[in-house]
């Protein structure tokens, strides 16, 4: 982008760390700027240059913008109209991870339990041996919370509930039924 010429200032995440103006992934880009007309114009100019240079047309309907809580509503609306991006409060999830963790951690990380339940219920445990169940748990089900734990500290309550799901699946228990094979 234009960070070298100080046209886009980016996001400062620490005192002794350079500001981040952009993050590029395989098919996603995140841009960080100040909420000013000048920087918004430079972003739009950079996107236009990209379209011409690459020969690709950007789908502006997929673009989203979110503002810091410190930006006045009037300024947000003005900049949003200029960018024509859809404004969102939070981005929900990105790459399967929550983009922000505030409020109830139980609610934020509920998707872990939902994905675990879906994986475990998707396999008909009646047709799997104990070895098959163990492989499914270790290779697939435990990867879900492990991936999230690389980035976030997950509450023990959620991890314990996951362990309970593994045990019930391994031993073939359903709901409140007690069963040992």
Image: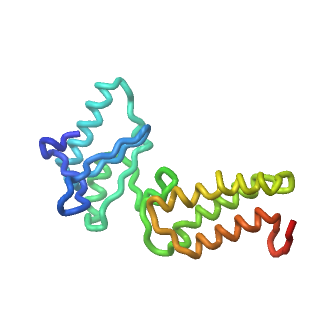
For the point 70% across and 64% down, the residue is 166
Q: Is residue 25 left or right of residue 39?
A: right
Work out whether residue 9 or residue 170 is closer to the camera in this orientation and state it.
170
For the point 23% across and 37% down, the residue is 45
Q: Quadrant of residue 71?
A: bottom left
> Percent position (x, y) of residue 168?
76, 67
State which quarter of the image contains the N terminus.
Answer: top left
> Percent position (x, y) of residue 92?
48, 58
Q: Is residue 122 above or below residue 163?
A: above
For the point 46% across and 59% down, the residue is 150
Q: Is residue 116 above or below residue 102?
A: above
Q: Is residue 137 left or right of residue 104?
A: right
For the point 18% across and 51% down, the residue is 9
Q: Is residue 17 left or right of residue 151?
A: left
Work out whether residue 21 or residue 90 is closer to the camera in this orientation and state it.
21
> Percent position (x, y) of residue 27?
43, 38
């Amino acid at each position: 982008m234009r960070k070298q010429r100080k046209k886009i200032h980016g996001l400062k995440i620490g005192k002794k760390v350079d500001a981040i103006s952009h993050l590029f992934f395989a098919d996603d880009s995140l841009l960080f700027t100040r909420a000013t007309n000048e920087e918004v114009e430079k972003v739009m100019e950079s996107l236009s240059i990209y379209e011409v240079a690459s020969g690709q047309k950007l789908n502006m309907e997929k673009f989203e913008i979110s503002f810091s809580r410190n930006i006045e509503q009037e300024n947000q609306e003005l900049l949003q109209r200029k960018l024509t991006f859809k404004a969102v409060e939070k981005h929900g999830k990105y790459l399967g991870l929550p983009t922000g963790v505030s409020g109830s951690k139980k609610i934020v990380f509920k998707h872990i339990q939902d994905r675990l339940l879906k994986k475990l219920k998707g396999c008909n445990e009646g047709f799997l041996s104990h070895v098959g169940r163990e492989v499914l748990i270790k290779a697939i089900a435990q990867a879900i919370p492990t991936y999230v734990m690389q980035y976030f500290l997950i509450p023990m309550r959620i991890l314990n509930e996951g362990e309970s799901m593994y045990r019930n699946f391994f031993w073939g228990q359903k709901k409140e039924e007690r069963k040992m094979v």
